[in-house]
Amino acid sequence: MNLIHTPQRPVMLVIDVILTLLAWTGLVMLIVRGLVPMLDTHGGPRLGAPIFAAMQTLQVYFWIAVINGAILITWARYQKRRSDSFAQRRAATASLSDDALMESFHLSASDLDRLQQPGVLVIHNDEEGGVQKVTAHESRDVERPGLKLVPGSDSSKKAN
């Protein structure tokens, strides 16, 4: 599974660490506060303890969970709304037509045709950012030797 990791600002990282430590501290305190009285044997076994005391503790835990859930859901919806508006601001712009591209960079029709062909080109710009001249790189016009068959290969046997 691939996860996307984005760098986080140091201030936000510190806030996240502090909130996480506070949450873990609260959880440990609640567990200790609930377990220590049960394990305390000074008064003997607690078999006669009323069930309502346990229900009250569970009710407190339940309300803490509901409040935490509401905070998390609110935060997630806020972040979703925030990221949607950010995505709209960063939407891709419409493509330029050939005529608009020629006007924007002061290109001639022949230079635009040359730019649309595959290969390596050298673009010379003027001082205003327009295209002054488009030339082919010298490697584009180099004649490449043809491929030769190696004696003993399968394709040379089939040709015979």
Image (cartoon, grey):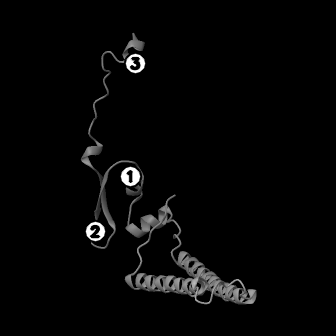
As measured in the structure, the alpha-carbon distance from the residue carrying label 1 to the one carrying label 3 is: 38 Å
Estimate the x, y position of residue 144 in percent, counting from the top left.
Answer: 28, 34
Q: Earlier in the sequence, mark 3 or mark 2?
A: 2
* Element class at badge 2: loop
Q: Quadrant of the C terminus?
A: top left
As measured in the structure, the alpha-carbon distance from the residue carrying label 1 to the one carrying label 2 is: 18 Å
Q: Residue furthest top?
A: 160
| Residue position marked by numbered label 1 in the rendering | 114
Indicate the quadrant where residue 69 lies: bottom right
Contact between marks 1 and 3 (CB within 8 A): the answer is no
Q: Earlier in the sequence, mark 1 or mark 2?
A: 1
* Side of 128 where 16 appears, left or right: right
* Element class at badge 1: helix
* Side of 156 where 31 appears, left or right: right
Q: Earlier in the sequence, mark 1 or mark 3?
A: 1
Estimate the x, y position of residue 32 in percent, counting from the top left.
Answer: 54, 84
Contact between marks 3 and 2 (CB within 8 A): the answer is no
As measured in the structure, the alpha-carbon distance from the residue carrying label 3 to the one carrying label 2 is: 53 Å
Seen from the viewer's position, the closer of residues 74 and 21 is: 21
Indicate the quadrant where residue 155 lies: top left
Q: Amino acid at mark 3?
A: Ser
| Residue position marked by numbered label 2 in the rendering | 126
- The image's mark for residue 155 is 3
Q: Are there few (<14), some (14-19), or many (20+) residues within 10 Å of tag 1?
A: some
Estimate the x, y position of residue 21 in percent, counting from the top left.
Answer: 46, 83
